[in-house]
Image (tube, rainbow, N blue to C red):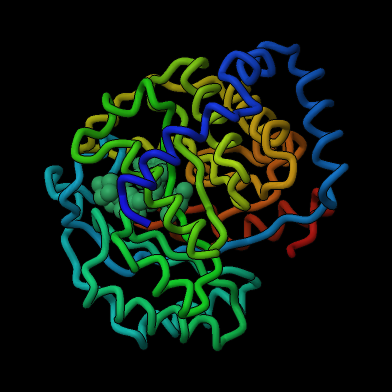
Amino acid sequence: MTVATATARAAAAPISAAWSTATVEALFELPFADLLFRAQQVHRAHFDANAVQRSTLLSIKTGGCSEDCGYCSQSARRGTIEREKLLELDEVKVAAKAAKEKGASRFCMGAAWRGPKDGDLDKVIEMVRTVKDLGMETCLTLGLLGPGQAEKLAAAGLDYYNHNLDTGAEFYDLVITTHSQQARMETLIRVRDAGMKICCGGIVGMGESRRVRASLLAQLANLNPAPESVPINHLVAIPGTPMENAPPLDPFEFVRTIAAARIAMPTSWVRLSAGRHEMSDELQALCFLAGANSIFYGDKLLTTGNTEAERDEALFDRLGLKAV
Ligand code: SAM
Ligand code: DTB
Ligand code: SF4
C-alpha cells in the first residue's frame, strides 16, 4: 500500500468510529464504584478475571534516538543515556530463555530508532526466529516502518508489533515534534495489513487533561479492530527529560483510565505497563479490578526499573491471580 492510500485510510477511520471523545469522557465522569462495576462486567464477559498475561521487555538497541519524544530518556538530545549498539543474537537468546524460565509468555524487543534500516531489520528478524524457537510469543517495537518492512516481519512469524499512539491527537505535537501521530497511524495500518497483531496504547501522567486521556482511548478503540494489546503506561518521570517535573496524576484517575480502556476495548488485553514500580500493591490490585489483565514482567523495562518478579509473584499469590 502506498503512503497516500494509508494516509487516506487513517484519515477515514474515525468517521466510522463507534467511540467519541465525549462518550469516553462520560465514562471517566462516572462515580468510581459505578465505573469499576461496568468495567468488571465487561471484563468478565470476555476474559477470566483472575488471569494475567506476562510479557518481558528487552532493549535490544538503547539510546541515541533521533526523535525528541518529551518523556523518553533515549532521545540523543537529552544526554540522559549512553548510546549502545544493537545487541548480539546470543545476548538476546540468553535474556529470552531467562524470561521464559521465570514464566513470561511473550518476549518484547525494543529499539531506540525512529524506524529500522533494512540491514538492521534483517538482524532483528534473526532475533525473532530465535525467540520463537524457544516457544515464546514475540513482539517488536522498532518505530516507524517503511514499505515492505511489516511484510518481512510477518513472514518471519512476528506475533505483535508495538507502536503506541502515546497521547490524544490534540496533545501530541506538544510532546513530540520530530514525527507526527499520523505517521504512526500509517505504520499501524502497515502492521495490520501485513496480518500481525497490534500492541498500541499510550502514556498518561504527562500533564494532559482528562479530555486528552479520553481522546487517546477513543482513537485506540476506533482503530477498527481495536488493538489486540493495549499498554497503558504511567509516565516514568526521568531526570533530564522535559517531563521530569510533570504534575502528579491522581492514582484514581489512572485506575479510571484502565477501566475506561477496558470498557471501550472489551476484547483487548489491557496492560498495566510502565510506572508499576512506583505503585503500591493496593493500587495495582485496583488496576486489575478495573480490567487490566497483562503486565510487563521482569526487573527492567527499557532503561528504567520494573517491579521485581518476586514481588509480582507474591502479589499474584495474595490476589489469587494466575499467569497465562
Ligand atoms: N522507538 C520506538 C517507538 O517510539 O515506537 C520504540 C521504543 S519507545 C521507548 C516505546 C514506548 O515506550 C513509547 O511509545 C512510550 O509509549 C513508552 N515510553 C517511553 N518512555 C517512557 C516513559 N518515560 N514513561 C512511560 N512510557 C514510556
Ligand atoms: C510500552 O507501551 N511500554 C514499554 C514498551 N511498550 C516498549 C516501554 C516502557 C518504557 C519505560 C521507560 C524506560 O524504561 O525507558
Ligand atoms: Fe526514540 Fe521511541 Fe524514545 Fe521517541 S519513544 S525518543 S522514537 S526511542
**Left of 120 or right of it: where is 276?**
right
**Horizontal and vertical percent for residue 65?**
19, 53
Q: Can you say whether 145 is above or below 95 in the image?
A: above
**Horizontal and vertical percent for residue 24?**
63, 20
Q: Can you say whether 275 is above or below 228 in the image?
A: above
Which residue sits at x=48%, y=45%?
A: 274
Nearer-the-camera pick, 220 or 54: 220
Which residue sits at x=34%, y=68%?
A: 148
- Would residue 303 be visible to someone looking at this image? no
**Horizontal and vertical percent for residue 152?**
39, 74
Which residue sits at x=44%, y=84%?
A: 94
Which residue sits at x=61%, y=38%?
A: 280
**Horizontal and vertical percent for residue 312?**
65, 56
In the picture, which quadrant includes the C terminus? bottom right
**Left of 179 or right of it: where is 282?**
right
**Left of 196 or right of it: where is 128?**
left
In the picture, which quadrant includes the N terminus? bottom left
What number of labels is visible?
0
- Would residue 156 be visible to someone looking at this image? yes
Nearer-the-camera pick, 228 or 69: 228
**Left of 297 or right of it: where is 165?**
left
Q: Quadrant of residue 208?
A: top left
Nearer-the-camera pick, 104 or 109: 109
